[in-house]
Amino acid sequence: MSYRGVRNWPPVWTYARNGTVRTLRGEVGILRHVYADPLSSKCFLVIDFEAENYTGSLIFKDLAFSKDIVRILRENVGRSIPHIGDLDVSHLL
């Protein structure tokens, strides 16, 4: 998946607390929450990695595609990001 020619999966995961900012890259952690505005093609994901919460975002050009991805992500809350990354979403294209 990509947005404006830049891959958006997996997102860059960011942890920020008490002045500390850390980032992770790659398919890591367990998906805990998916936040999405129904009128926007952007969603925010929260993962748990090594007992800390990290946030990442996905942006899509197409609102309908975004809604489909959000639905699939919500169906997979509690699963690993590597598992989610292996899901076949080609039928949505």
Image (cartoon, rainbow, N blue to C red):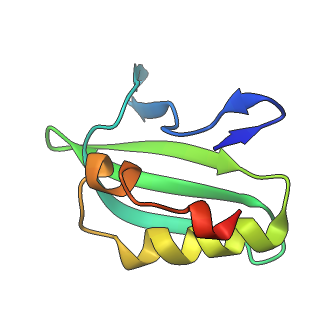
| Residue 23 in view, yes or no | yes
Q: Residue 41, image x and y in percent?
A: 78, 61
| Residue 36 in view, yes or no | no
Extreme residue toward the front, this view: 91
Q: Nearer the viewer, residue 89 or 45?
A: 89
Residue at 37%, 29% (x, y): give it: 26
Q: Which of 93 and 31 is in front in this view?
A: 93
Q: Residue 56, image x and y in percent?
A: 51, 43
Residue at 64%, 59% (x, y): give it: 43
Name which quarter of the figure residue 17 lies in: top left
State left or right for residue 37 relative to residue 32: right
Question: Quadrant of the image for the N terminus?
Answer: top right
Residue at 24%, 54% (x, y): give it: 80
Instruction: Tell me if residue 67 comes above or below residue 29 in the rendering.
Output: below
Name which quarter of the figure residue 69 lies in: bottom right
Instruction: Tell me if residue 69 comes above or below residue 9 in the rendering.
Output: below
Q: Residue 68, image x and y in percent?
A: 64, 74
Q: Residue 49, image x and y in percent?
A: 22, 41
How many discs appear? 0
Residue at 33%, 70% (x, y): give it: 77
Name which quarter of the figure residue 84 lies in: bottom left
Question: Quadrant of the image for the C terminus?
Answer: bottom right
